[in-house]
Image (cartoon, rainbow, N blue to C red):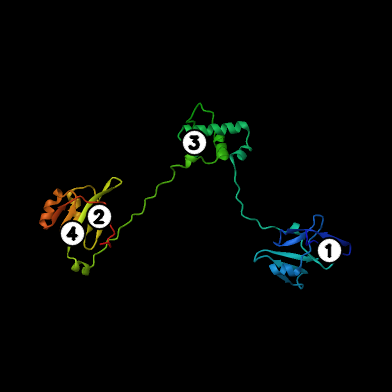
Amino acid sequence: MNDAIRVFSKGGHQDYSEKGTLTVFPFEVYYKSNSLANILSLSKVSEWYRITMNTDKEPVMVVHLNANVSHKFIKCGSGLYYLDTSQVEQPIDDYLFLSTVKSNKSYFSRREISGADRARDLQAILGWPSTADLRRYIKNNLIVNYPVTIDDINRAEAIYGSQVALLKGKTVRQSPEHNFVKRVQISSPLLEQHSEEQLMWIFLFVNGKPYLHTKSTNIKFVSIQPCRGRGRKEIEKGLEKGVKTTDCNSDDDFEKVKLFLEARNISAIVRRMKMSELWKDPFEP
């Protein structure tokens, strides 16, 4: 390398042509495989970490890596301070240990693995009872003429872990939260300006269930309500809007509410309705 250096000492000189990152401190230093130690610059280390020294207590230089970890450089006979890296406890990172079926089988003999396979086969034949229930069946001699022991069941659990079929269907379905629709009150000034309305209505189906969909032509008041069917009571309930309705537009079902409309002097206009008419933007003319 171009930036190789030569270091002189009382015993002669030594050339360094390689660099590496220290395990203890994360910066580069010159490296030589047959060298006994690395010489660190106090100035360089102080750029990375806080260094303290109190010779009244002990002749050491303390390098603080963080609030919890520090390394002591001890004074030796030649006046230098050294750190024995073999005595330094390295921080342990988080590890995740994975085990495979192949590695688990290495702890058992072929005969034991065969017994574990028979235990899993029996569990499948019985419709995947829990492992605890299967142990109870074997312990109480409820299953005869089948060469499976409790130890086989335990080994199957150790080798294969929890079977997917055992995990399915074990979770209890939680009751969903009910979504309550907040009712919107029509303001009085709006009713004063539009005291009469024309109403369009039609039935639509969602997942096979009927809903009554209505829309007024003046204030564009849109509503939709779930229904048990398409009977008279359901239609009458949907037409009660709190405003005076003069005309009703729909494509059918007027016979069911004929008396209801006549009692309120509402004209029935029969025409083929399109869902696009009801779903049109309420602010469009």
Q: Nearer the viewer, mark 1 or mark 2?
A: 2
Q: CA distance from mark 2 to mark 4?
A: 13 Å
User: Regarding mark 3 in the picture, which secondary structure is present there?
Assistant: helix
Circle 2 SS class: helix
- The amino acid type of the residue labelled 4 equals Gln
Q: In front of the other: label 2 or label 3?
A: 2
Amino acid bearing label 2: Glu
| Three-letter residue code for mark 3 | Leu
* Residue 58 quadrant: bottom right
Q: Nearer the viewer, residue 98 or 137?
A: 98
* Badge number at residue 198: 4
Determine the residue located farthest toward the right in the rendered image.
11
Residue found 75% across the figure and 69% down from its top: 42
Residue 13: percent from the left, percent from the top? 86, 62
Residue indicated by mark 3: 134
Q: CA distance from mark 2 to mark 3?
A: 63 Å
Q: Residues within 10 Å of mark 4 (few under 14, many from 20)?
A: some
The x, y position of residue 38, in whole percent, is 78, 61
